Amino acid sequence: MSEATPVNLPDHARDTTGTAVNKAAHDRRSFLKWVWGGLKTALAALLGVPALIYLADVGRRQRPLRGFRRVARLSDILQHGKTSATTGKRIYEVVVRETRRDAWMIHPNQVLGRVWLVHDPNQKIEPNDPQSALVAFSAVCPHLGCSVRYDAMDDRFSCPCHAGVFDLSGQVLEGPPPRPMDRLQVRLVPDKSSSTNPPDYFVEVDYQEFVPDIPQAIPRS
Amino acid sequence: MWQSWYNWLEERFGYQRLKEFLTSGVTSRSHRWRYVWASGLTFVFAIQVLTGILLMFAYSPGSASAWGSVYFVQYELPFGWLVRGLHHFAAEAMIVLMAAYLLHLGLTGMHLPPGEAVWWTALLLFAATMATDLTGNPLPWDQKAYWALQVELNIIGGIPGLGPLLQYWILGGTEAGQLTLTRLYALHVVVLPVVLAFLLLSHHLALRRYLQQEEKMDSENGTRSHGRWRPQVARVVLLVILASLCLIPQAMPLNSHHDRPAGQEPASDTAETRAWLRWAYLGRSGCGAALEAPADPNVDYPIARPKWTYWFLFQLRKSLEGPWASWATVFGPVVVLLVLFVLPLAGRGRARWWIHCVSVVLLLVLATAIAGLTAWAWWNDYGPSASAEKFQEELHKQRDRAQRAIQLAARGIPVEGPAELLRRDPRTRGRELYQTHCATCHGFGTLIPVKNAVAPDLHNFGTQDWIYQLLQRMRDETSVESQVMPQMASWLRREYERAARADARAQKAGEPPQATARLEEDLKRIAAWLAAHPRRAVPQEGPQRQAFEQDTSAFARGYLAYETHCLRCHVYSGIGGGDTNGPDLTGYGDADWLRGLLHAPYSRQYYGPSVVRWSRLANPRSWMPAFRDTENANAQLWQRDWERTWNELEQMVPENDEKREQRLQAMRRVCTTLHLSELDRELIIRFVLNDDRLVFGGPAVLP
């Protein structure tokens, strides 16, 4: 890239005759060169920076919002839930549905996740704090995300993929899962329209997903 | 270190030779204005390639997805408006540049030998640019694009011989849709850009050879070469012109705004208040290229126009009549292009000067004709004339639709496609349906005024104000309301008269008159109560009842007022009525109530007993017909339902009535059923109730 190579010389540094140019012309040319370079850089930045931001497209779309969603009535669990042979608890699977947003598309009423509800009919219902009487587990296996199912024969939860086994309180009995089943927040809301005694409740679950295959239950961001 | 790296590159790849090849043609002569065009075109082409690639990261060619993806680029992706706007306006700039370049070449005689290769490649470039533009315009699949494509393809189809075949191939069948888009897309992003790149390269090579020739002639003739400072100035000026061509139209916020309904903003939008982020989403303020409502073959679009760069062809076609019209628009440009193409062949030797003169005249005439036709087209649509006014009116209507579609798209586009946004929007489609089905009798405020309405205006139906105003209008015997609900109206007038009498008595006794004021107070309370569409049961006895009577809530006050005045005729929650069987007021005015009303207004629950009373009149005014789907699978069911209701109505006419047969006949005439699909019914209900949610298959909703 030596100055002597004529091909490498910029257009303006050359004269048709090939003789040296005077100083004034040189100054003018270097000024124009500077303006030209500046313009090119400005234009490149003007287009390049937005282009990069456009391509990066970060943090705009989110997972469905958190919040309590109505999934069942307490009477459903009592009527349709399976009864644990050893503890008398009722085990019932519910589906959490939500409108999903896929870029510009919207899919109403999609399955957000499945939840296992474990209800102990012998415990007294405290609507504000039902933790002792009603527990909600995410059906997503904490190992690698398969669907955990209830095994009525052995009265325990099991994951079909890698043979993880949990008891009714979600603790790991066998297999690779690094932590117990993920508990979800649950609450009971009195059903004002019900005429039964004791009154019926709506079960509401705050569904969320957790990072798989680590010992702690950390919500996915 | 850089040097060794460079040396290695040079040794292994020999880039230096390529560089030498690329720069070898550059001489002082390349600074003349006429050589700047080609560089400018290359620059714009580069912008098109870059922005095009960026757009491809989001665009999805498909009749159900294209509009949504373009919407997404324009309004949801950061700087998407800029990328799309650049691509859009640079395309226009490229056509303008091409035209100016050709004009410059022709006027300066550069198209004649030895410049014929320059001229021919330039002409081919022009055609290829137009083709790229024409295949790109329909890609957003909005109304404008869709209808312009229809016209363009019909013109192509009019070419004798190959035309219909070409039309069929581009459409991918006989209708514009999925295949049309994918074919246009393939042409636009791969085939034509490759052709363009090849032509640009050839053009540059031809231009360089021409320069060398020119230089040789100059040195032979001893002509002085041009100044040295020109290249920079020329480039700077050109760059500024190009940049402003691409950027200025974008900065004008002329397009649809993206005003999300309150409470619909995604959580992350709060961060967008930051200044630089506002730049990223300037498309929401209407900057950048326009996006119209999604393409919908069902919706009339009487203002189909091509892009302004083709207005001259459009105007030519419009101003010609008969079989010549298609000939002129299809063959006219082809013939002109061919003539331009062969000009250099004729311009050899001594004929050169003459051909140059002919070319100058020809090009000037062409340019004037194109400019004139374009101006004429503009004048027709934007000038001061009746047809322009009509065009403007329609344009505004379409812009409103676009605005609404974009507002709705912010909530997400259904899988069925973006056209469903407006088809299922109560405010758009519901209003149209109201116009067709309801506006023969019911007005709707200033939005849909109806002359000689024979039924109440339904603007703000079911609100407290509407109900109260309805009651007040009934006091006037000549009003529509008192004519369609005569019993209710006469009862109301009697109540007011009684209150007035009580006031007069009180005045005589020297007490303050309160009866009228109390009646009005009660009516207001009832209106407020009804406006809440009450459905809750009220305790009728026991301590709960006592507690309810002490309740000061609007519901309790309203219910108690209802009990005093209306209970005798109107049922609420299974109680009351009996006397004259007025309509059931349980949930009055909510969607469910309206659904039932539309389904069978003649049922006992609604205005059935009134129908019986009406039949006493010799000439009953038109009565609300039933609206329901008479074509779906449930039609049989409804028919049975109707028979049951008819039996009920029949029994309400006394057996000993001497005019029984005539009355039954009149009732039958009044109880007509008109077809209305369930979707349309829901759209009308939501429109009347000012409920903005889209309707998806009957009552299921999308928030």
Image: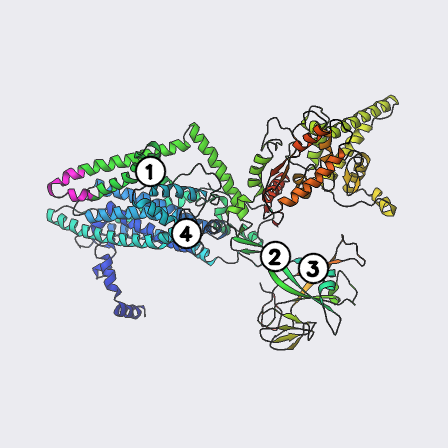
Q: Nearer the viewer, residue B353 or A156?
A: A156
**Residue beneath disc 1:** B313
| 4 vs 3, front mark | 4
The mark lying in front, picked from 3 and 2, is 3
Tell me the subunit letter for badge 4: B
Question: On the rendered image, what quadrant is the N terminus of chain B found in?
Answer: bottom left
Tell if the residue under mark 3 belongs to the same chain as the one under mark 1: no
Check chain identity for marks 1 and 2: say if they share one. no
Per the model, the C-alpha gap separating discs 2 and 4 is 33 Å
Q: Residues within 10 Å of mark 4 (few under 14, many from 20)?
A: some
Image location of residue B205, percent across then percent down: 22, 54
> Disc 4 designates what residue?
B179
Instruction: Give neighbour class at mark 2: few <14, some 14-19, many 20+ (Cα, 10 Å).
Output: some
Q: CA distance from mark 1 to mark 2?
A: 52 Å
Please rate how many residues cluster around mark 3, counting C-alpha atoms within 10 Å: few if below 14, some from 14 to 19, many from 20. Answer: many
The part of the chain drawn in magenta is B342-356
